[in-house]
Image (tube, grey):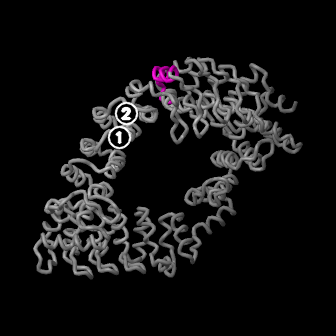
Amino acid sequence: AALMLALSTGLAAADRLSEARKLILRKQYGQAVELLTQEARQGQPEACWMLSALYRKGQGVARSPGQAFHYLRCAAEGGKVTAMRGVGLALLAGDGIRKNVVEARQWLERAARAGDTVAAERLASVDQPDWPDDYSALVKVLKATPAEQISTLPPERRKKVSRAGESLLWPFVREHDWVRAGQLLGLGLEIDRSRQDGRTLLHDRVLASDWEAVRWLLRHHARAARPDAQGNTALHLAVMQSKTVELPELISAGALNVANRAGETPLDVAVAANRASWIKALRQAGGQRRKNGLNEAQYAEKALADQARQAGLPALHYAAQTGALAWLKRQSPKSWQDKDPKGMTPLMRAIEGEQWQTASWLTQHLTTLQLDEVRWIDKVLAAGEIPLAKQMIARLPDERAALHVLELALKLRAEAVYAALMKQISLQGASPRLLLAAARGHAWEAVRQWVRYAQPVQFDAQHRHALWYALAAGKRDISELLMEAGQRPLVRDLFGETGLHAWVQQGMPGDNGLLHLPGVSVDGVNAGGQTLLMTAVLAHHPDAVKRLLEAGADVHARDDQGNTALILAAREQRVDIVRLLLNAGAKPGQRNRNKHSALNIAEQLGNEEIVRLLREADKKGGWF
């Protein structure tokens, strides 16, 4: 009664706050919350301050640290000094919100300037970071500390290294935190300090192909000629790591003709690895080689033979796997289909190494693929190398092999490939398995052609049949053909979803007439008892919700947990969908098995717009 009097007689703000305090003293917290919320919406700092306390303690409302902080900030922004201090301390501790030391200092400074001695004392301790002795803990503190305060890092802490011997500079260069990395360099940290394995930060970033960090290190005078434990410079490692010249500045950084412990210069390494772009760039810069009296071709032959021996492969197969096409073109083997100790041909090795140009060249030298080589078309198609796939298809040994490749092409939706394959396959080779592959690959013309193979029904590993995929794609005409051939529309896959549920999850693309097919129900459920309407809500598709409602979907249906579509929409915090469901007659007072209604959930989540909509619906329908 006191609450209604306060609201209806238009008491002054001070009177309403006084009335709220009395309600709290009488432990009538719910009425106090409602009265204070009206004032807080007007930005009244004292109301915000009191609401913050109620949300923090869970008095009259569900306990919510997030909402408590929201109203605490509201009070601080309204000028309440103790709230300013509270916001600063909360941000400093990460109490219910994400920790933010910089913003915490700003609020504490505002409170201190306003005369808050507690804030002033806490601010003094914030200004002096606590520098831990442990390396990992020290890195975390440095990341959280404002860059301008890093200069206060004590000299003894600057020397800290990880167990691997990495200085404090390493993590910040790896994360591209150039401001803090620059600050640490200014404190005297060595840019060329090596860790226990002899590698410097420059070596580390080259091996990670982190060219932005390499460029930053060179700009800050990192020594490119410094060797690691094997005598390799950063330039040696760059040639080994990258097929192309990613950072020309590295070539001119002073390590052009430095030899490693094996006596190899970067150019030697480039030639041995067949790095054409590196060979050209290094030679143009004046790079030299240590040839041991061999000419270029002899040196390359010896280097490749040595590397093949280390890899345990015949030279022919190793060259194919590493893309040494120039070396291959100089060979004249008796057969390009000889197998290595692991039963792989040079073509298979080239595909394994993703050396597509080499694989194409080898394919041109073959008349017919071996069956083992046919299986490698899978990887070629998966990599999107369609021209090579077509070359290999032209050399398939028989129709059985062609059917295997066609099934894969359909699965991967490689239309250019299965168009070429259809010319090599008779319709007598089709089967229910191939029909399923066509539907899974959305090759709808092939499905039309092979619809007579709809029986016996073939299921894939996800327990989906051809009709499941047609429904999921919104293909009404194909679905009708498959249903006429005897396939059932309400089959659930391993995840408990029907094809129609999958269609709704995608926003109901294609033909809305699917809902009117024989045997299809607009209120059909998945394994969790969720209707198509509920699926549209959970997938955040308001257009699909609207279309399903227009098709007569039951807005009051419940899933296995007793949830209605409205309860799920409130939980997902979708204002637009809540509005659609209410307009369709959804009852906001319905509760699930946990006794929660849409209003309960919206209030707990602090979504004021949904709460407002539900309360307005209550006034019209009296559902609560």
Vertically, is 352 above or below 290? above
Q: Residue at x 37, y 42 (%)?
A: 404
| Secondary structure category for the residue under label 2 | helix
Q: Would residue 65 be found to the left or right of residue 231 on screen? A: right
Q: Magenta region: which residues? A: 472-484
Q: Residue at x 34, y 50 (%)?
A: 376
Q: Is residue 525 visible?
A: yes
- Tell me if label 2 and label 1 are in contact, CB under 8 Å: yes
**Residue 174 inside the magenta-drawn segment:** no
- Disc 2 residue type (three-letter): Gly
Q: CA distance from mark 2 to mark 1?
A: 8 Å
Classify the position of the C terminus by image quarter.
top right
Q: Residue furthest right?
A: 26
**Relative to residue 609, is residue 551 depicted above or below?**
above
Residue 451 lies in quadrant = top left
Find disc 1 in the rendering and name its residue.
400
Quarter of the image that includes the N terminus: top right
Image coordinates of residue 183 in percent, x first then y, are 42, 69
